[in-house]
Image (spheres, rainbow, N blue to C red):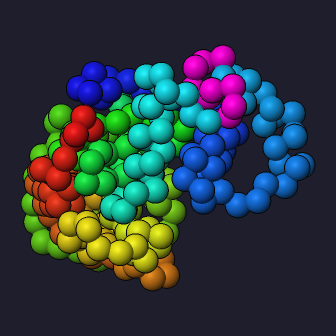
Amino acid sequence: PEHWSALRVVLTSTELDVLERSLAAEEGTAPEEEPDEVDRPGFREAVRSLTVRGVLAPDGRLADGMLGVWLGTALAARFAPGVVLSVVRTVAGRVEDSLATDLVGDPHAGHGDRLVHLTHRVACVEDVLPEGVQLALGEPGQAVDEVVSVCVPADASAGTGPAFTHALAGLARPDGALAHALGRPTSLVRLEADVPRHVAAAGGGRPALPPPSCHLVALGPRGCWVADLPAGPPATVAEFRPVGPGWVEDWVRARAEPFSGQGTMAG
C-alpha cells in the first residue's frame, strides 16, 4: 500500500531479535532456542512490548494487523535476495579552523549508518541507532532519495582539478591535510553495495545483480570527490577524482534499477 512508505518504526535490538525469531519460526528456519536466551528479562519485556503494540499475536507469531504485516514485510526484505547499500557518514562538517566543531543543524554533517536493502518487491531502509534500528519501507526506486537525502548537501558543487592520492588514516575525523585537500567537505561518506552471503548462495529467479563496489565520497560547496576502495583489506591510500554532486544519485540508481518494475509492495 502506498501509505506504507510514510511509516517509520523504531525497534530496540532485543525487539528486533524477537521479531527475527518469530519470522524464522513461521518460515520453519528457526534454530533450536536456548532456554536462557528467551527467558532473560529483557527478552520477555520485548515480547510484552511488541504484543501490546499489536505487532505480535498472543501465540508469538506476527500479528495480522497493519503493523504486524508491515514489519513482516520489512524483516523479510532484510533477508530476501537482493543488494544491500551501506551508507556510513564518517565526518561531521566543513570547519574553517578546526575539525572538532560540527555544523549545527546540517543533517548532512552528522555521523550515522544507513542500510538500504533492495529486493525485487521492496526497499527496506534501516537506520542504525545506539540502542536499535529505525525501519522504513519504500519502492526500490525510492532508494535514490533515501541515500541522497543523507549524503548530498544542497550547496554541493562539482569538483575541479586533477585527481590526487592521499593517505586514508583517521577517517572518523580526517586530519587537516585531507580535509583541506577535499575542500573541507560537509559530508564524507563511505558508500558500499554488497551482495550478502546468503543471497549470493541463493538460486535463480532474481534480476541480474550489479557487482559489489565501495567508494569514499566527499561532498561540499567547494567540490565533490570520490575514491574507489578495495573489497579486501582496508586501503592506506586512495586516489580521489573530481565528480559532480549527481555522482551519488547515479551510483544508487544503477544499483536500484534491476529491482524497479519487478513488482510493488502492493503486488
Residue depicted at x 59% and y 52%: 24
Quadrant housing the C terminus: top left
Segment tinted magenta in the rendering? 52-60
Quadrant housing the N terminus: top left
In the rendered image, the residue lying farthest to the bottom is 232
Q: Is residue 244 left or right of residue 193?
A: left
Give the x, y percent position of residue 133.
Answer: 54, 38
Residue depicted at x 70% and y 61%: 31
Q: Nearer the viewer, residue 97 or 218?
A: 218
Task: Confirm whether the magenta stretch covers residue 57.
Answer: yes
Vertical order, 177 against 221 (above or below): below
Q: Is residue 250 left or right of residue 49?
A: left
Task: Confirm whether the magenta stretch covers residue 148.
Answer: no
Give the x, y percent position of residue 138.
Answer: 28, 37
Where on the picture, by quarter, is residue 253?
bottom left
Residue depicted at x 36% and y 49%: 116
In the rendered image, the residue lying farthest to the top is 52
Q: Nearer the viewer, residue 32 or 15?
A: 32
